[in-house]
Amino acid sequence: MAKTGGPARAVTAPALSTLDFALDRSTPVPLYHQLAQQLEAAIEHGVLAPGNLLGNEVDLSVRLGLSRPTVRQAIQSLVDKGLLVRRRGVGTQVVHSQVRRPLELSSLYDDLEKAGQGPGTRVLRHETVAAPADAAAALGVAEGAEAVVLERLRLTHGRPVALLCNYLPAGLLELDDARLESTGLYRLLRTSGVVLHSARQTVGARVADGEEAARLDEREGAALLTMSRTAYDDTGRPVEYGTHIYRASRYAFDFQLLVRN
């Protein structure tokens, strides 16, 4: 059993000094893998935040009672995942945690909250408009018919991760910005009596233009994941059409694939 001790070197917070690493030498699980898993969990749950420094490999090996190659292997596995970066003259630094989201009919807000990612929302647009062609077709209304459009910036631990645009049929439910900033859209739909049943979804990729890059704190031309979705209630009525973009550096979709006999 190894415990952390001593002061942590950190840019944003002395987070490492508060962590207890439980390393079990009696199991067949390699020590480097145990350490990597616990560091990754701390990053995913925001205990280690972007900018935190872990110190160098020598310091960590002494602090944890591990060999330097063991610590190096654990760190390298997280560097390979994009969670840590080695900076010359600085040490090993937390970059960010990547959001890994299952492909199912759920709200991004709820998924982030469940994963301990500290979700937040900024409402950029909320108004009734004439539905454009793509939204009208998805919602089963005439082009130009009234629809509610929502544009929101979704954040994790205060940093942008996704730009969301949703169209809803006019009159479907009452919404205000305060509620939209404190919870997810699908939760609001459910509490209004809308029973979500199924969705059609398309996932793609492209690069960010200047405005998108500025909003998502990315460079222009950075890789983006895209997703368009039409959600239906239990009567088969389309109740939401969304077109979302995600920072590829901070976001991934998880698929579960089954063999169809």
Image (cartoon, rainbow, N blue to C red):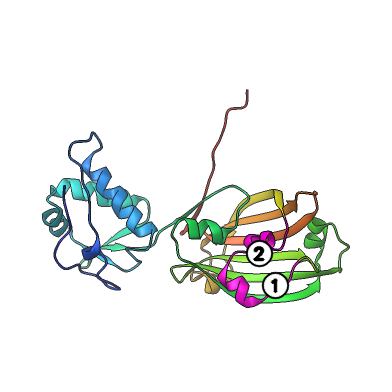
The amino acid beneath tag 1 is Leu
Left or right? Give the position of 229 relative to 10. Answer: right
Q: Residues within 10 Å of mark 2 (few under 14, many from 20)?
A: some
Q: Nearer the viewer, residue 135 or 27?
A: 27
Left or right? Give the position of 215 relative to 24. Answer: right
Q: Which residue is mark 2?
A: 188
Q: Quadrant of residue 225?
A: bottom right
Would residue 184 be counted in the magenta stretch? yes
Q: Earlier in the sequence, mark 1 or mark 2?
A: 1
Mark 1 and mark 2 residues within 8 Å of each other at the beta carbon? yes
- Label 2 secondary element: helix
Bounds of the magenta span?
173-194
Q: Position of residue 53 (x, y in %)?
A: 25, 66
Q: Residues within 10 Å of mark 1 (few under 14, many from 20)?
A: some
Q: Position of residue 200 (x, y in %)?
A: 71, 48
Would residue 2 be counted in the magenta stretch? no
Q: Nearer the viewer, residue 15 or 98?
A: 15
Which of the labelled discs sits on residue 143, or is there none?
none
Q: Which residue is mark 1?
A: 175
The structure residue drawn at horizontal position 15% and vertical position 61%, both measured from the top left corner, is 5
Q: Residue pushed farthest top?
A: 261
